[in-house]
Amino acid sequence: MAELTALESLIEMGFPRGRAEKALALTGNQGIEAAMDWMLELVAQKQREREEREEREALERERQRRRQGQELSAARQRLQEDEMRRAAEERRREKAEELAARQRVREKIERDKAERAKKYGGSVGSQPPPAAPEPGPVPSSPSQEPPTKREYDQCRIQVRLPDGTSLTQTFRAREQLAAVRLYVELHRGEEPGGGQDPVQLLSGFPRRAFSEADMERPLQELGLVPSAVLIVAKKCPS
């Protein structure tokens, strides 16, 4: 049996014919061993190149991941800043609306004063002051001092509406009861049919209906300080 040539031996070992021929040609046909070394070195070189390429791709993916993370963090920060800015603007708007509502209340009170003065032909403030309470008995012990009465400059009013809901607001102690009535008229829900009937304010206990004259009296004078519960009853228009 004739000996196999170097090319046939390389093919029999499993190397592709084209690569075996190239290996023999580049090694000057110095034999199987030289051709095999060349082909193994070629395989190792390709392996190194593949590993280097994979490493570069991994580094690039990591850079992209970090860049995307930074962009996401910056976007999240911008979103938080936008939310904080919107919240601050909302607070400013609510404060401005509250100030405007209080101004409308004051203007409405002044208009009501002028209308009542015109209707009754005199100044609203010309009504006689309430009678001073009679002095009580003098304490038997001269050494006993009466307790100091605390002065409040604000009062908290809770108003119960006919539908079972309630409104709560803080007023100045020297504000008139008309301010409470106007606050209820501005903030109560719409009546069925879209109309708004005038309201009558009642005290909780003891039950008392406040008159139009009471509307001009300060909350402090009416005994509604520091807090009180009022009840709204529908007032039939005259």
Image (cartoon, rainbow, N blue to C red):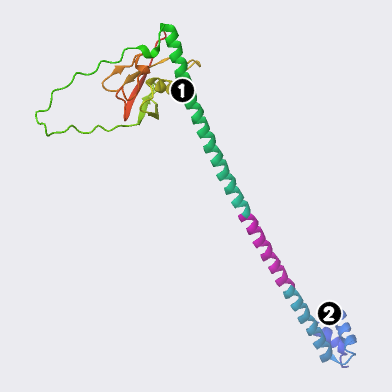
197 relative to 222 in the view: left or right: right
Q: Could you say which is closer to the camera, residue 228 or residue 123?
A: 123
User: Residue 140's x, y, as percent?
Assistant: 9, 28
| Label 2 with label 1: CB-CB less than 8 Å | no
Identify the residue shown where x is 87% and y is 89%. Answer: 27
User: Residue 135's x, y, as percent?
Assistant: 18, 21
On the question of residue 34 being in view, the answer is yes
Q: Could you say which is closer to the camera, residue 53 or residue 225?
A: 225
Q: Is residue 38 magenta?
A: no
User: Residue 156's x, y, as percent?
Assistant: 36, 30
Q: Quadrant of the C terminus?
A: top left
Q: CA distance from mark 2 to mark 1?
A: 101 Å
The amino acid sitting under disc 2 is Pro
Residue receiving disc 1: 106
* Range drawn in magenta: 53-73
Q: Quadrant of the N terminus?
A: bottom right
The amino acid sitting under disc 1 is Arg
Pick whichever of labels 2 and 1 is earlier in the sequence: 2
Q: Residues within 10 Å of mark 1 (few under 14, many from 20)?
A: some
Identify the residue shown where x is 86% and y is 92%. Answer: 31
Residue receiving disc 2: 16
Q: Residues within 10 Å of mark 2 (few under 14, many from 20)?
A: few
135 relative to 74 in the view: left or right: left
Q: Is residue 64 magenta?
A: yes
Q: Could you say which is closer to the camera, residue 141 or residue 176?
A: 141
Q: Is residue 60 above or below residue 72?
A: below
Q: Is residue 44 above or below residue 198?
A: below
236 relative to 140 in the view: left or right: right
User: Residue 109's x, y, as percent?
Assistant: 44, 19
154 relative to 187 in the view: left or right: left
- Residue 83: image quadrant is top right
